[in-house]
Amino acid sequence: MKALLIRAEDKNRWERRAPIVPADLAEILAKTGAHAFVEKSDKRFFSEAQYTAAGAVVCEGMTDGDVILGVKEIPVEKIQAGKTYLFFSHTIKGQPDNMPLLQRILDSGSTLIDYEKITDKSGRRLIYFGPFAGDAGAIDILSLMGEHWSAKGIATPLAAVRRAHQYDSVKAARAHLTQIGDQIRRKGFPPELSPFTIGILGYGNVSTGAQQTFDCLPTERIPADRINAFVSQAQGNRHTVYVTVFKEQDLVRPIDGGATFDLQAYFDHPERYESRFEPCLASLTLLVNAVYWERRYPKFVTWSGLKRLAETSKTLKLSGIADITCDTHGSIECNVKSTDSDMPAYRVDPIAGTTADGHLGDGLVLLAVDNLPCELPNDASTFFSNQLKPFVAGLLNADYTSSLENSALPPEIQKAVIVFNGRLTKNYAYLAAHLKQGRLKKPTVF
């Protein structure tokens, strides 16, 4: 049986999550009898003492482990030969920044399994942090905007909201937001921010987390096809937060003018669609982007659209954007760089097309933290670990000297194997085209 190792996350100082929490590790070891190691870390949320109590041995480096469990990308220089690695590799779209990492795994004869591709028979992801990205993004944008408006002399109850990482848990954050919600019911928002509207792009796990957090405040849902009339006709009141969830049919339309929206047709041929979202920007106070996006899809917020909005509005209602999906230069075009929790937002000048650091001052506030779940390390790790736990025995008992098909890896895991013993698997053979030729050796493909 293979030895398990939980690596120390080192992407940035805010990454305090773990793929397996101590309580789940104890269950795994009791069930399998495997050896487990935990790499030393001075910032992991769960202490080394908790892991040793669960049966792990503390180590330095990854030499002792056969199956290495991590969260974020592993530095290229730390990849060792002949190991099995599980982490979010950010390679499946051929991301240029991570092609050297993929090449190193190929060259080392190792196996790479990406959590993002572990799915059920219907293609639904089984291991993810989604809800907590939504939770953290919703908390942070409320906190940032409270401070932003306060610096402009606009007092709101949101000024009391703290950052997500300053709460012990989602439960604690929501309890505090509920208290702030009571103040909104009593005192309301100032007239210049009313009606207070939030648009959320997407309706999946990330969106669900954001919606549940916003719902700690006094909320009311407004359908996407009503939001413009709702705002222009001065409906609503100062004591409610109005939330609109935008689905695909609210965001795009066929370029040929077809009246019927076909979701599968959009997924199959997004180039035949264009964004229809721009007119709604004028009706939103805050925008939250929680929709999956690839470069073949239309962009929903463009620089040119923001400029038109700013030039035609006496007072720009849109004040902040939380790009939780955080595809830079992507569906939210003005997201030009990702941030971290030290300085989570920057300001966008819609007319000049420029940005400035920090959330205090003129411009649209743009939250662009690319690993928001790390701000809620306890909840996010526990949720993730509970999803991963059922697969760990299969990972440890698998035969990595055989073919992938005969390895006895669980079928859900097999679909997520990008590299098996130093070779790209059939499902990911397309990545060969993304590896730089010349400097990087063309890989062998099964």
Image: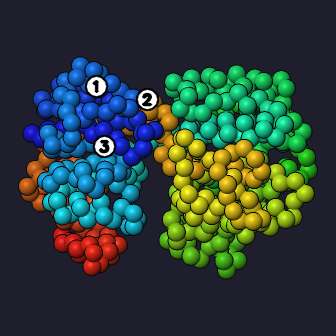
Instruction: Answer whether residue 388 is visible to the viewer in this image.
Output: no
At x 27%, y 40%, the residue is 7
Which residue is nearer to you in this view: 376 or 153? 153
The image position of residue 320, as x and y in percent, is 71, 48
First in residue order: circle 1 vs circle 3: 1
Q: Counting other residues with Cα less than 10 Å from the Cα at mark 2, is it few (<14), some (14-19), or many (20 or more)?
A: many
Quadrant for the C terminus in the image: bottom left
Instruction: Classify mark 1: residues with Cα within 10 Å, few (<14), some (14-19) or many (20+).
Output: many
Residue that appears at 80% across and 63% down: 309
Q: Please report whichever mark, 2 or 1, sits nearer to the chain's N-terminal start.
A: 1
Q: CA distance from mark 3 to mark 2?
A: 16 Å
Residue beneath the point at 20% across and 42% down? 62
x, y percentage for residue 261?
A: 63, 67
Residue 378 is tagged as 2
* In this view, the mark in front (1 or 3): 1
Q: Secondary structure at mark 2?
A: helix
Q: Position of residue 172 (x, y in %)?
A: 57, 23
Is 325 placed above or below 159 here?
below
Helix, strand or loop for disc 3? loop
* Amino acid on which disc 3 is placed: Gly
Residue corresponding to mark 1 = 48
- Residue 70 has which mark? 3
